Amino acid sequence: MYVSPIREPLIKGNKTYSQITQDIAAPIEGKPGKAWYMGLTISLSAMFFGLAMMGYTVWEGIGSWGLNRTIGWGWGITNFVWWVGIGHAGTFISAILLLFRQKWRTSINRSAEAMTIFAILCAGLFPLIHMGRPLLAFFVFPYPNTRGLWVNFNSPLLWDVFAISTYLLVSLLFWYMGLIPDIGTMRDRVSSKIKKYVYGLLSFGWTGSVKHWQRHEKLSLILAGIAAPLVLSVHSIVSADFATSIIPGWHTTIFPPYFVAGAIFSGFAMVLTLLVVTRKVLNLENYITLAHIESMNKIIIATGSIVGIAYMTELFISWYSGVEYEQYAFLNRATGPYWWAYAIMMTCNVISPQLLWFRKLRRNLVFTFILSIFINIGMWFERFVIIVTSLHRDYLPSSWSMYSPTIVEVGIFIGTLGLFFSCFLLFIRVFPVIAIAEIKTVVKSSGEKETKNETL
Amino acid sequence: MKKYWKSQHEKNESSEAKITKHTPKGNLEQVLDIFEDGTAEAKSNRRDFLKLCGYSLAITTVLSSCENTVQKAIPYLNKPEEITPGIANYYASTYMNASDYASILIKTREGRPIKIEGNNLSPISNGACSARVQASVLSLYDNSRYQSPQIEKEKVSWDKFDDSILKALDSQKENKIALLTPTIFSPSTRKAIKYFTDAYPNIKWIQYDTQSASAILQAQKLCFGKDGLPDYRFNKANLIVSFDADFLGTWLNPSEYIKTYTDTRKLSGSLNKMSRHIQFESRMSLTGSNADERHAIKPSELNLLIAQLYNEIVILKGQQKHDVPEATKIIKELAKDLLEQKSHSVVVSGSQELNAQILINAINYELENFNSSINLENPLLNHQAIDEDMDQLIDNLASGQVKGLICYHTNPVYSHPKGEKIKKAIESLSFSLSIHETPNETSSLMKYIAPDNHYLESWNDAEIKKDSYSLMQPAIHPLFDTRQFQASLLKWSGQDVDYHKFIMKHWEETLFPSQTLYTNFKSYWEHTLQEGIFQTKTVSGNKLKFAELDIIKILEAITQKKKTNRIELQIYEKVTIGDGSMANNPWLQEMPDPISKICWDNYLNISPKQAKELGLETGNMIKLNGDLELPVYILPGQAYNTVSIAMGYGRTICGKVGKDVGFKASHLNTNQHSSVTLEKIEGHFDFAMTQTHHSMEGRAIVREANLDEYQKNPKAGNDHKHEYKNAGIYKEPEFPNHHWGLAIDLNACVGCGACTIACQAENNVPIVGKKEVIRAHEMSWIRIDRYFSGDENEPGVVFQPVMCQHCDNAPCENVCPVAATNHSSEGLNQMIYNRCIGTRYCGNNCPYKVRRFNWFDYTQADSIPNNLHDPTGMTLDLSRMVLNPDVTIRAKGVIEKCSMCVQRIQEGKLNAKLEGRKVKDGDIKTACQQTCPSGAILFGDLNDKGSDLFKLASSDRNYHLLEEIHTLPSVSYLTKIRNKKS
């Protein structure tokens, strides 16, 4: 396939196929370093702390959170939306970029998809744990029963249930399907009997025959076709939780596109946070190059600007609507008691990504890492601003109230971070972080050697 | 085979059984048939056998796998004739405590009193109950009550106790003993006391009221030679002027006054006139907040204003002018207006000074209000204590002249300003006896404790006003080993008669002859007991004559007092806790004060201007007079240079609930306009405040207009209509039969909060405690929003009761994922607790924020152990007896809210069905409506074009709260109309 000579190579260091396999399989075959053990210890401790806090919530009741009669959702749903948002990058990269034939996706799609699944796991915990009676959560499923009970299909929360579970299922399938050839590779490389047996089981008998490859490719495309609309639909439906309500600041038709853009924005930020570190620690700089970082930064500035426009549109429309409640809600966001949250959101999400117009900064790893953290924080505050500042002062001033989280809510959030990073740390030790089979498909066209030869 | 039958019955029965055999049966019934053996014809086939096996297996599995707690429901051995399980019985009775009087119906279920309802037959309380009356039923089940007689903290039997008392009384024959009671307006009790003091002539009876009306009583005596308090008839007044009398809140007989006051302030199509109300006061009281015109003054300025008003009236009437400083324009205008409304005005004052009350009498006399809007023929009798008597007693106790003290239902050590002095005196007394229900600061010092019955366990009678009688009857056998005060007195005076008989005898002798309707006493008594009240005819007295008093001297005494610039302190009673005798009642503790919306505390009210000067904010701490550290509440409308604090708090000896709640203030109450010093100190205090934002932010939440605008246009203030038919995406529901709704007249609602406690009692609404209220976790189904408007030093105040609006296009209904909240075919927004999983989405999406979430296990209905949050002991077995069995208690993690008293609707419908008719307008009353003293809440059927509700809902003043968001509520409000002078 023709690749423009001005394009940067996607794989550096004149890698051969076997070098690629060796480089990527190295973290699985070698012994983990101290840093990994430390990281896992911290993550697991955080996770268990979170689990304890969840247990406490179930035992004592939601009263152990900082919510009240006016503000029924706080950190819990903020974290839910945040994690769902983060879970958007993986599928976007693997499905939409696959359909658009973006070759650079091959270096990052595996870890991004893994991240998606872990993020969805974290996100899924919150709707469950924030319920007053989580043991009865199965009521949300429309299962046939003799009592003639049925769910309410008018409720966006119910759509959420289907949207999130579908998304998790498709993402998981897609991810695992991509893993199969690589698991086959691992099966052939590991020496321990047990490992061989387990990888053998997981590889579903992959032999690498042409028929297998043919089916693999077909299914990839089919799943990409299914997953691509999901990228758009999941966060649209999450946004419907708010958009279909009547609370000023929630009741907004712009929410679906605004949420999707925000989700991709935050998802890429999280991918960057993880990969900037991972490529260094696992010596994968040749595969995840500055060119990859720059491409992702370009997506960040695009989606970040969409988000910025959405914020401005909201403000304009609230003024233009002439509805006093609507106007107050946005005035209160910017100047009310939670002005600082709005300021953090604006700084992190709208102003700071604009620095990426400079090429130097786009290719600066330290800057990229700091910016990605900024965006993670900013996007968390976006959800906080939407949820809490809209609720805390709605229609009747008599009920206006304030909200601050308790240690239990913070603990659960920390717990999900722990869960997320524990999963990720285990993942990099068990499965290839980069899709070996897929990256080999681009090494001929976009490897360093190839591009150099052509420019010569 | 030939069939032999033993009796005709058996023969008929078998033939009946044959008939029923042929009726078609459902699947389950068929299966159940298998279990009935003895039916010879029923042949079991293979299918039945398999079914039987299957069902047996299933049942055995289910039964053996579930461990259920065994709850024993024991049937009556002998069922009392009048009790049908599931059906409530009502007994007429009377509530009386301090300023609260109500003729009531006690609702009992299976022998337990569970709710107090007003008695509609009473012309005085008019079927209304105040919050305290509503809460009184909970005091019956107070765990801290005395449970048996005690001598020096030792529990003894009544026999032994009586012996000791008689011996002690005999040995004290030479010593002076005082019997201290609150005002007794029960004729039979007075007679019993007389018997007692006759038997022991060394015992002197003294009455002491925590809310003194001494000055008014003395003024009545001096001016007209009459006893008792004037009977104010606010419904006959077009102009009401109050000088610091909180007559809607706590003053004298507020429940009756709310009714008569609001009678002249309700507007309807035909009636477009209302009274005007002017209030002079220093603290923003409930009364002041309802006034059309309110003037913030210092307590020390009160008397001078009264004097000036008197002078102006006299001048206008062309009489001799007095030497009083020139009055302001306000007073001059007021004098003119009052004369215009001659004989149709009321001037009242809460002043504790005799001179002021004499002038008030003189003003009303000049205005010819007596025997029109103020009646002296039927004086109010619930305050009869004279302050001097109590002062005398304290001196005598201190000096040792009085050597014994008997306290009945009074707690002077706590409530009297000289409490410390009394405490010291009691400790050195040779005889001290307390007759009280619960331990308190006084009784804990006493040697003998004779526990009194709760009023729901007692017989009594009352004469609240001359010729207006009511009866009290027990609705339950005494829960503990207690005996009512009057029975004890009779016992100790050697009368071998029980108090019930004693009352009957008294009534037979005195009241029975005064009527002609009944010829024998038994039927008279039974009817009266059933109705609860009895009126005798009033004999008209002579023409009223104002005594020759030296008015000039009185005016001189008033004008001589110099104005000071010092900060003055006023002690007041809260609408909720009152004098503190009910401090152990969690319902009252958790009821927000109507003005400050703070519960579980008292605080120092300070004016906004003064707060600015001292750099204070609500919740800051202040040092009062250099010793008492108090939190500050900035009260809009509090007069500058004045502060106020509520009494009734800071109880040190009472049950667990009221102990150490707030700060004791009674010792500061010195009746002199005591000046105080304020000093800001470090520290912050968290108030349990149910409303923290006080402005309507310019939103049309409470719509109001002035009377002149209303007279021109009944739609005044309500001219924007935002409701359209079928504007939503969902089809509007149809209500083929009933469409229940409420209308709330904002002009009638005074904000007293009685409805909130009635709702709490009716619907088993949990108490969450102070810490939880601070976290905005209060559970009230109905709340009263209070908004201030205008200048914070002279604010306008509006009240708005808000409960679930039962929207026909309810935002909560479509967002619930499991359909746990839905719409009934009668327009109710229903909550299905069983189905609720607690996402709180409905609560978020409710624009009225009336949905309440069970944050913790408040009721012990949760299946997880050891997670109960019950700071006030409401889940103790004893307290649980107050629960209404018709209303489910809610478990942790579910949403609850106003159901429009669906259990009452159901009861009304069933009663109508039994009688074979449709539900009539007025059959069903919600709990809030039932208790409302002003009749501001009306329940009814919006489909019934003839109903009162329909009339209100189609009036020009009717509007829906937040109607612009198309929620289509079934609850509507009527605009508030003020009568400001234009």
Image: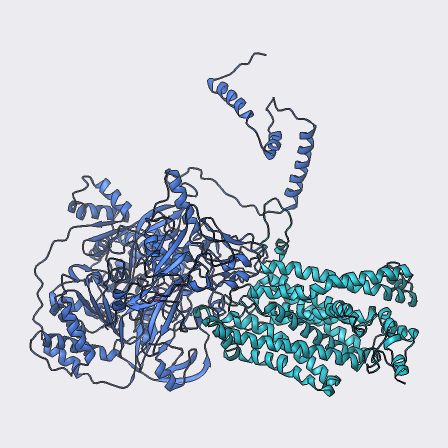
Chain colours: A cyan, B blue
Q: Is residue A283 above or below residue B920?
A: below
Question: For the magenta stretch, what is the residue range?
Answer: B579-584
- Residue B225 location, quadrant: bottom left
Foreground: A442 or B320? A442
Give the quarter of the figure containing the C terminus of chain B.
bottom left
Horizontal side, residue B516 vs residue A305: left or right = left
- Locate residue B288, reporting x and y percent: 29, 71
- Residue B605 location, quadrant: bottom left
> Looking at the image, which residue is at 60% across and 66% down?
A239
Q: Is residue B610 above or below residue A418?
A: below
Horizontal side, residue B487 vs residue A92: left or right = left
- Locate residue B695, reporting x and y percent: 40, 73
- Asked if one can make out residue B636 in the rendered structure from this viewpoint, the answer is yes
- Magenta segment's dominant SS is loop
Give the quarter of the figure containing the N terminus of chain B.
top right
Horizontal side, residue B239 vs residue A164: left or right = left
Horizontal side, residue B897 vs residue A77: left or right = left
Task: Give yes or no for residue A38 being in the magenta stretch.
Answer: no
- Locate residue A301, reporting x and y percent: 68, 79
> Looking at the image, which residue is at 45% across and 72% down?
A324
Q: Is residue A80 above or below residue A370?
A: above
Task: Give yes or no for residue B580 being in the magenta stretch.
Answer: yes
Looking at the image, which residue sits at the far top?
A: B2
Total marks shown come to 0
- Locate residue B90, reporting x and y percent: 35, 47
